[in-house]
Image (tube, helix red, strand yellow):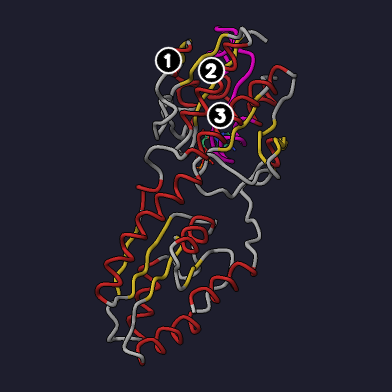
Amino acid sequence: LKKIGVLTSGGDSPGMNAAIRAVVRTGLYHGLEVFGIMRGYQGMYEDDIFSMDSRSVANIIQRGGTILKTARCKEFFEPEGRKRAFENLKKRGIEGLVIIGGDGSFRGAQKFSNEYDIPCIGVPGTIDRDMAGTEVTIGFDTAVNTAVQAIDKIRDTMDAHDRVFIVEVMGRDAGYIALHSGIATGAENILIPETKTDIEAIIHGLTEKEKRQKLVNLIVVAEGEEFGGADEVAKVVRQRLPKADVRVTVLGHIQRGGSPTCEDRLVASHMGYYAVESLLLGRKNVMVGVINNKIHYTPLDKAVKEKHKIGQEWMKIVKILAS
Ligand code: ATP
């Protein structure tokens, strides 16, 4: 193995730059030539590929986003698109790939590798943390800390005015950001896609507070929760408690950006390093994950989006601590 490529694909997440840096510098350490591929599979298809040196990843470990940019590439779904992408790799002699992205990107890599025998190593970059085969993903820690900082600020004004605040965080399929940020900010209720929302219990709690003339309440909602997000939950609360001062904040894309936390930089550095080591050891088509603080490899076709079981115990703790 002499030449490898690295790309970021799908949704971006803070810490991807730290992973790119780790891949490039580990590759160079082993005497490999490392190519950066711009905008995920799109750059592979359009031949937007360049040789990287140590300086091309200088001063990026602390930056959000990805210097390689990311995209969704429709041509890569088609055999002809993948063929053209392969030809672009072949003419440069690229023999292995590190793909930093989510499960869709890994599905593409698996297909590509079956067709062209190019070993692909996946590195999980997603703020949602909902991947099989790993307990950590690059970007989650930053996203959840951004949410905590924002919710803390909302809490100050909520408290000053006796308001009910419903804050929506990201998580179409997974409630980790909502659960962690909700617990860390002392939310009274946390609504996530993994568990059924007991709206009656929430209304009951609010009604009791209203009777005591102290209707201050923080509800943290994942966007994929069963009612369909903060606005929908607010509709129900307003209907049932017409006197309540209910406010909605949707945090949105601020959760994807910003300087990665120390934790995300460590995770990305660790995974990026092991991705290159894996290629050198002859591993192919696996995702580098971390389970119980140890590196863990999962075949790319098993590294799918997975609804982890979020413990009922945590939900019980949330209730007790908010009472
Ligand atoms: P996110 O966490 O944002 O969902 P992702 O990596 O899952 O990230 P996708 O948009 O699903 O993002 O996939 C990224 C790209 O991977 C697609 O635009 C496409 O180019 C490629 N890809 C995804 N699925 C396939 C597939 N089944 N066959 C070929 N290529 C695919």
Q: Determine the residue positioned at 37% across, 40% down.
A: 258
Dot 3 corresponds to which residue?
269
Segment colored magenta: 84-109
Q: Residue furthest bottom?
A: 211
Q: Determine the residue positioned at 74% across, 19% down.
A: 281
> Badge 3, how many Cα within 10 Å: few under 14, some, many 20+?
many
Judged left or right of residue 244, residue 66 is: right
Question: Does residue 150 lie above or below 109 as drawn?
Answer: below
Dot 2 corresponds to which residue?
24
Q: How far across and how far down the image is residue 257, in percent?
A: 38, 41
Question: Does residue 218 lie above or below 150 as drawn?
Answer: below
Q: Check contact, mark 2 vs mark 1: CB within 8 A.
A: yes
Q: How far across and how far down the image is residue 250, in percent?
A: 34, 59
Quarter of the figure with the N terminus: top right
Label 3 and label 2: CA atoms lie apart by 11 Å
Judged left or right of residue 67, residue 225 is: right
Give the tally of numbered discs.
3
Question: Does residue 160 lie above or below 223 as drawn?
Answer: below
Q: Determine the residue positioned at 55% across, 33% down.
A: 268
> Badge 2, how many Cα within 10 Å: few under 14, some, many 20+?
many
Q: Which mark is residue 56?
A: 1
Label 2 and label 1: CA atoms lie apart by 9 Å
2 or 1: tag closer to the N-terminus: 2
**Of the residues tagged 3 and 1, which is closer to the observer?**
3
Task: Tell whether position 291 is magenta.
Answer: no
> Badge 1, how many Cα within 10 Å: few under 14, some, many 20+?
some
Q: Determine the residue positioned at 40% across, 48% down.
A: 255
Name the element at disc 2: helix
